[in-house]
Image (cartoon, coloured by chain):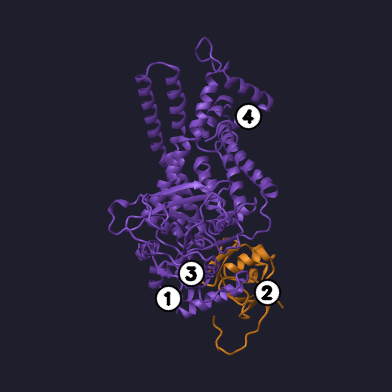
Amino acid sequence: MSECGDCHDCGAAAVVEFPGAPASPKIVALAGPPNSGKTTLFNRLTGLRQKVANFPGVTVEQHTGIAELPDGRAVGIIDLPGLYSLSPQSEDEQVAHDVLTGERRDTPRPEAILLVLDSTNLNRHLMLAAPILALGVPTLIILNMADDLRNRGGHVDTRQLSAQLGAPVALVSARQGEGIDEVFEFLASAMPAPAPQELPVLHDVPKCREWAGRVGRRASYRPPVPPKWTRRLDSVFLHPVAGPLVFAVVVVAVFQTIFTAAVPLMDGLRWLFEVSGKWVAATLPDSIFRSLLVEGVWSGVGSVVVFLPQVLFLFLFIGILEDSGYLARAALIADRTMARVGLQGKSFIPLLSAYACAVPAILSTRTIENKRDRFATILIAPFMTCSARLPVYTLIIAAFLPNRPVLGPFLGARAAALLGLYLLGFLAAVATARVLKSSILKSGHTPFLLEMPSYRWPTVRSIGLRLFDRAKVFLRRAGTVILLVTVVLWIMAHLPPVNGKAPSIQDSLAGTVGRTSSRSSSRSVSTGKSESG
Amino acid sequence: MQLSGNNVPLKTSFTTLVDLRRGDAATLDHIDLPGKDARRLMELGFLPGVRITAGHSAPGGDPRVFQVDGSEIALRRETARRLKVRLDKTRQAPGMP
């Protein structure tokens, strides 16, 4: 393959065709087991040139990005969901498998694979190398967390490992940015197909583990000593008494932040939308288009965008909890309680944040790998009484209930009613979860497995990129789906025209639809459920 | 681990992972689960013959973290019960004759 050494105008845009070189950038897949630091490496390679979408037809997020090589060429990178083997058991793993084997029609088969393994747990992680190398696709074996390996007294001979696997090996620390050059070098090279010395029978897990152990031994792999700090922190965070206390503090902090700290920012945004809306209204001549723009589009999209601070605060917390390793411990502590309603520990944080707002809560369910548990959590999250419903409740209660004492001076009728409404929402969620998990979303007998990663300092870079990503996804939805909905709603509220002007809301299409639906459904349900946040 | 003597044959007794208390170690004998689930556990390191040490647990002892093959994996009781092990030491063998 000819390099473009002396040709300066071929740059990043791969428009110029070279003999034998593809016109579009190379597509490379990033694969690896969960907790191998794959996403950190993806962030390191692509920086801000990332895109989040959904794989069509499934609920799996597709992260793609562009890595720019030192010579200016661009390489497309797909960050695949974590996988333990190429015998997929979850939807996430199925997608990763299908992309790697070229069975997904919507994604081009990657020309090469970057296989990310945790170097501090190489004997087990190497098992995944067997089925990946057997695909015959050019592969770079990336041994991540090199800093941890070194600091904890571990060792591996990468040249010997490379000879054993018949594929290049790079010792990398994605967090520190160490060894990234080697990844770029591989991407810039001709990328030969792997030629491993031997491969085990892929369907036989014990044989694969034996093979991994043998390869590790030949590469003089010395596992690091157990992480001292992880053991120390776990003796606090998983202590029978201190553990639940820390958990409670974390939960209150998350709750408090999304409930209160985000409010001034949200008010600021709301104010900004109001003021700019008025300005637009004052600038444009009075017409049906001004009404559509200001009352439909602007206030509609604005009412959703104000949730952005809450969404970002929640993801800041979840990012810190997830990257530090505490999220797995929190899930462990919450698991037993959640299991009673058929859910699992990882559903806890999303459900809790639904008390602040259902929107970020539903977005945050992506940390739940099990698809059925994720759906059940999404479906019950709106039952939790969100903060936007609180003023509505207070208003209705104040209008209908006199404030008589119920339990002496401790509890008034209004407070009791409010508490009752919160409780009602919670019970509805529990009941719905039970029904869903024992019927259409039954998980079967798939065992619940939770890997406890070592504690690590979260990096500003990784959290920042994640927040940026989430903000983009949220704003894009606000700019597409929600925009469309608000326009449709506006049109329904303005049809049929009366004397060339918009009808009163009762006579409009929206009013008619509303009356019909409230007549057919039972009245008590439709009034309570229409407000959601 | 106060037991000394490398060649002293330890009395082995069959039990399940559920019966392990914190700090107990055992050797996995077999997994009593359908093929697919057993396979996933094996991919995570729960292979016959491997040494498993019981670690911390959630309040109430369920789920519990197990150290296996360089990783720490939490299992619920209902799953841990299906992993049949041989205790490495006789110090604590609750529920077994």
Name the residue type under label 4: Ser
Task: Report the Cα–Cα distance between label 1 and label 3.
Answer: 20 Å
- Specify the quadrant of the image occupied by residue A171: bottom left
When the figure is inspected, residue A136 is found, relative to residue A518, above or below; the finding is below
Q: Secondary structure at mark 3?
A: loop
Apparent side of residue A302 relative to residue A130 in the rendered image (left or right): left
- Residue designated by label 3: A194
User: Which residue reaches farthest right?
Assistant: B97
Task: Report the Cα–Cα distance between label 1 and label 4.
Answer: 64 Å
Name the residue type under label 3: Pro
Q: Are marks 2 and 1 in contact (CB under 8 Å)?
A: no
Q: Residue A399: image x %, image y %?
A: 56, 24
How many numbered circles does the render carry? Answer: 4
Name the residue type under label 2: Thr
Name the residue type under label 1: Val
* Discs 1 and 4 lie in a common subunit: yes
The chain to which mark 3 is attached is A
* Discs 3 and 2 lie in a common subunit: no
**Dot 4, how many residues are within 10 Å of its Cα: few (below 14), some (14-19), or many (20+)?**
some
- Residue designated by label 2: B15
Q: Are marks 1 and 4 in contact (CB under 8 Å)?
A: no
Give the chain letter for orange: B
Which numbered tag is attached to residue B7? none
Q: Is residue A155 visible?
A: no
The chain to which mark 1 is attached is A
Q: Residue B22: image x %, image y %?
A: 57, 71
Instruction: Answer with mark 1 or mark 4, whichever residue precedes in sequence.
Output: 1
